[in-house]
Structure formats: C-alpha cells, structure tokens
Image (cartoon, rainbow, N blue to C red):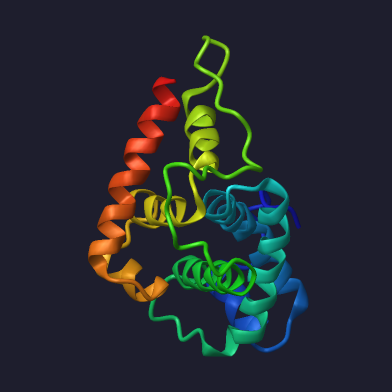
Amino acid sequence: MTANDVSGPTTDDDVRRAQQGDVAAFERLYHSHAPAAHALARRMLGDESAARDTVQDIFVRAWERLASFRGESAFGTWLHRVGVNVILNQLRLTRRDVIRFSDDEPDANAPAVRPPDGGIDAQIDLEAAMARLPAGARMAFVLHDIEGYAHDEIATMLGLAPGTIRAQLWRARRQLMKHLDG
C-alpha cells in the first residue's frame, strides 16, 4: 500500500491492528505519517540526512510505545509529540550545548541562503534560513512559530525558563530577517 492509496483500513483501524502486532497496519501508518515526521525533524534539526535517520527513530519509538496510545487524540497528534520527544532526546544526548544561542555561531553545516531570484521558492529560502540558525534558536522558532507550542510548554520540554525561550525566539526571528534580507 502506498501513501496515496485510499483503499483499505482507516487510520483508527490501522492503529488498533498495529497495537495487536499487525506489522502491515503499522507500515500503512508509517507511509501516511512519515512525511509530517520528516518535515518536523528537518525543521528542528536543520539537516536533511539527520532528519531521514530521525524519522526512523521516531517510528521505532512509536512502535515501542504504541500500547500507550489511548485514542484520546488523533494518532497524528500523538505521533507528533513522540517525534518532538525523540528529537529533543537526540539533541540532549549528542549536543549538550544545543540550547545556547549566539549571533556569532550559525550552524556550520547549513547551506548558504541565496537571495530570491524569481526561480527560488520563498519557502525554500525560509527553510535554508532556518537551517542556518543555531540549534537552540531554531528549536525555539520551530516549536513556537511553526508547531504552535506555548513558551511555557517549550520551556518545560527544554528544561529552560520561559524568558529564555522568549529571548531565543526574538533572536531567531531577528536572525531570520537578516538571512532573508541578506
């Protein structure tokens, strides 16, 4: 079954079947939800290769925790939260300084931002500009302005004060404007 195939069980049926160990049902869930998980990982990590690997980690964790899904929210909402947790845990384990922000420390692995020239989509420019942000500022921006989490929620996720999140968000927006105007 492909992601575009509309025949077959619904998401609720697939969740129930996957909870009972049906690997094919979980595969259908993977195909329908992997693009959103990939977009989240790419935005938070700023790296395409790491995002692809992280999607796999998200779905491994989802499979391991599928029994805890009670259906009180949509499966996609639950999976989104699993994804955010997986990404934050990876960042905590691999880059302890990810929360810091410095105007002088853009992500060295990020592609350079090219100014719009009619052939470049504005969304691509924003993605490239976000990738250039230091990781802490990028996470604050993605979690607040794109994913819609409140300052207090982000602060709890990252173990920081809400004021720190507000400051990182302000700095991220300022840096994005510089990158996009540049």
Q: Nearer the viewer, residue 8 or 71?
A: 71
Q: Which residue lies at the image location 55% right of the left edge and 34% below the top edge?
A: 128
Q: Position of residue 54 (x, y in %)?
A: 67, 63
Using the image, determine if residue 123 lies above or below residue 78. Answer: above
Q: Which residue lies at the image location 38% right of the left edge and 76% below the top edge?
A: 159
Q: Position of residue 181 (x, y in %)?
A: 39, 21
Q: Nearer the viewer, residue 83 or 91?
A: 91
Choose top left, top right, bottom left or bottom right for residue 74: bottom left
Using the image, determine if residue 150 lies above or below residue 106. Answer: below
Q: Position of residue 179 (x, y in %)?
A: 45, 29
Q: Residue furthest front?
A: 104
Q: Residue furthest left?
A: 163
Using the image, determine if residue 9 lies above or below residue 116. Answer: below
Observer able to see residue 8: no
Q: Which residue lies at the image location 47% right of the left edge and 73% below the top edge?
A: 78
Choose top left, top right, bottom left or bottom right for residue 31: bottom right
Quarter that holds the N terminus: bottom right
Q: Nearer the viewer, residue 159 or 80?
A: 159
Observer able to see residue 132: yes
Q: Position of residue 43 (x, y in %)?
A: 53, 49
